[in-house]
Amino acid sequence: MRRMERQTAILKEVAKTGSVTALDLARALAVSGETIRRDIMALSEDGLLRRTHGGAAMPNPFEEPSFRQRLGENPEAKKAIARLAAKQVRNGDSLMLDTGSTTAYVARALLNHRDLLVVTNSVDIARTLATRRGNRVYMAGGELRADDGASLGQSASEFVQQFRVRLSIISIGAIDEGDGLMDYYLDEAELSRAIIGRAERAIIVADHTKFGRRGVVKVCRWEHIATLITDCEPPKSFVKNLKKAGTEILVTD
C-alpha cells in the first residue's frame, strides 16, 4: 500500500470512531507500528488529525488551520502545483483566483505572465499581480477577513458574477470521497461556486492532504470542474469518481 493510500485509510479509520490506537491501525493495515507513527505524525502536522497517547483522534472538524500555517504546509508541493497551474494560463488571459494558500503560490507563479485580467477576493493575490506587466486586477469588495485578507459575503459574490473569464483557479479546503469538494465556511463555499460558474474552465488546485479530509459545506460536484491539479496520484476511489465526472487529473512531476 502506497503512503498516500495508507494515510487515506488511516483518516477513514479515525473518522469511523473519532479515535484509534496505533496498534489497531498497524494490525488493520498490516504495517509496522513505526510506519503508523510516522504517518500519524505527518497527518498531524498537516492538521488532518490530532496525535494522542498511543494513537490518533479527529481534530476539531469545524476549524481550518490559519492562513499562515497553511502557507507553511507542504510548500514545495504547492509551488509545483502552482507552476503547473500557471502553464494553463496564456498571456492576455482572463481568470479568477480565490483566496487560499495554494492560489497564493499560483499568483507568484504568474509573475512572468503579462496583460492578464484577474478577478480575485484576495488582498494578497491582488497585491502580487497588480501594476505588473500590463495586468488589470479587480478586487471583490465585502467584509475583509483578518486571517487571510479575504473579501467575503454577498457583495463579493455579486461582484464576481459581473465577469465572464476563461479560467477560474480555485483552492479547496477538503475533498471527501462521497461529497466531493468541500469547505469550512458557508460564505467561502458560496464565493467558490460563483467563481466556478463564471468561467469557461474551472481548475481546482489541491495537494494530496486534501483527499480524505471532510469539510462542513459542500461546494460542488466534480462535473463542474474541468481539471484537478495535485502533487500525487489520488486514491483509486477518487480517481474513479473523477474519471466518471470527466474531470482531467494533472499530477506534478
Image: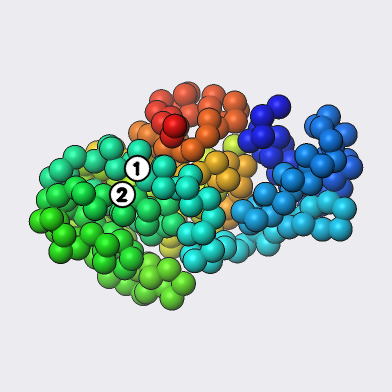
* Pointers 2 and 1 in contact (C-beta within 8 Å): yes
Assign a secondary structure to mark 2.
helix
* Residue 70 at x, y percent in the picture: 51, 59
Q: Classify mark 1: residues with Cα within 10 Å, few (<14), some (14-19) or many (20+).
A: some
Number of numbered tags placed on the structure image? 2
Near-viewer residue (212 or 1):
1
Instruction: Say which residue appears at 13% left-offset and 45% top-offset.
Output: 92
Instruction: Say which residue appears at 21% left-offset and 55% top-offset.
Output: 118
* Residue 135 at x, y percent in the picture: 14, 56
> Distance between the Cα atoms at labels 2 and 1?
6 Å
Q: Tell me which amino acid carries mark 2.
A: Ala
Horizontal relation, residue 33 to residue 144: left or right? right
Near-viewer residue (210 or 83):
83
Mark sitting on residue 33? none
Instruction: Say which residue appears at 13% left-offset and 55% top-offset.
Output: 133
- In the picture, the quarter occupied by the N terminus is top right
Residue at which label 2 appears: 109
Q: Classify mark 2: residues with Cα within 10 Å, few (<14), some (14-19) or many (20+).
A: some
Q: Tell me which amino acid carries mark 1.
A: Arg
Residue at which label 1 appears: 83
Instruction: Say which residue appears at 85% left-offset and 40% top-offset.
Output: 33
Q: Is residue 135 visible?
A: yes
* Residue 213 at x, y percent in the picture: 61, 47
Residue 191 image-quadrant placement? bottom left
Where is 58 relative to 166, above or below? below
- In the picture, the quarter occupied by the C terminus is top left
